[in-house]
Image (cartoon, rainbow, N blue to C red):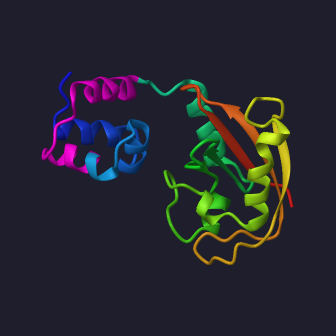
């Protein structure tokens, strides 16, 4: 299928994806996606095939249910991609803490020093190879007003997603 500029943009928006996320998945720059959508540049045949595979994925009922549960939770909870740290969903209480819309944005840049240390320790603990399914993490303040993190504890839980990626459910526990 030849993806016209209009079709590519429509499919991306229907899937709730930002240009930067499609670029990450396609291993190109965000500017390349922008040029494809503007009709200035045409994806190669291999890129067309990759786009077809990307947009052929139908969101699974399980992923949709998890997203719906997170977005309707009364707890301070959010779901990120375990690899890219992009925000996939957030509860109303969590969203109210943030001063801007974050869905689709990488969250790691807002991490406190304590969270960064916990992230560095994950491989040694067996997080990425499945030996560890959940972990309580101490957080410290990140000193930001736009996406504040306060001192406390969160629970990280690994959740498999339909596309083979892992999600991380982050729940404030204190």
Would residue 55 be found to the left or right of residue 96 on screen? left
Q: Is residue 40 magenta?
A: yes
- Residue occupying image coordinates x 39% and y 49%: 18
- Residue occupying image coordinates x 52% and y 59%: 102
**Residue 153's image quarter?**
bottom right
- Residue occupying image coordinates x 79% and y 54%: 118
- Observer-nearest of 166 and 77: 166
- Residue occupying image coordinates x 84% and y 40%: 125
Magenta segment main secondary structure: helix
**Residue 25's image quarter?**
top left
**Residue 165's image quarter?**
top right
Image coordinates for residue 19, horizontal then vertical, percent: 35, 48
Specify the quadrant that holds the N terminus: top left
Q: Which residues make up the magenta segment?
A: 33-56
Would residue 77 be found to the left or right of residue 43 on screen? right
Q: Residue furthest toward the front?
A: 124
Image coordinates for residue 156, horizontal then vertical, percent: 77, 46
Whether residue 171 is visible, yes or no, is no
């Amino acid at each position: 299928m030849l993806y016209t500029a209009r079709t590519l943009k429509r499919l991306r928006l229907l899937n709730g994806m930002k240009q930067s996320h499609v670029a990450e998945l396609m291993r190109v720059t965000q500017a390349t996606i922008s040029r494809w959508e503007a009709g200035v540049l045409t994806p190669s045949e291999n890129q067309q095939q990759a786009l077809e595979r990307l947009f052929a994925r139908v969101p699974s009922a399980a992923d949709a249910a998890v997203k719906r549960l997170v977005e309707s939770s009364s707890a301070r909870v959010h779901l990120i991609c375990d690899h890219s740290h992009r925000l996939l969903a957030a509860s109303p209480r969590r969203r109210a803490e943030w001063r801007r819309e974050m869905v689709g944005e990488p969250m790691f840049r807002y991490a406190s020093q304590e969270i960064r240390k916990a992230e560095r320790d994950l491989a040694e603990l067996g997080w990425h190879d499945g030996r560890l399914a959940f972990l309580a993490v101490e957080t410290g303040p990140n000193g930001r007003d736009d996406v504040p993190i306060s001192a406390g504890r969160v629970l990280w839980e690994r959740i498999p997603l339909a596309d083979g990626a892992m999600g991380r459910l982050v729940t404030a526990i204190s």
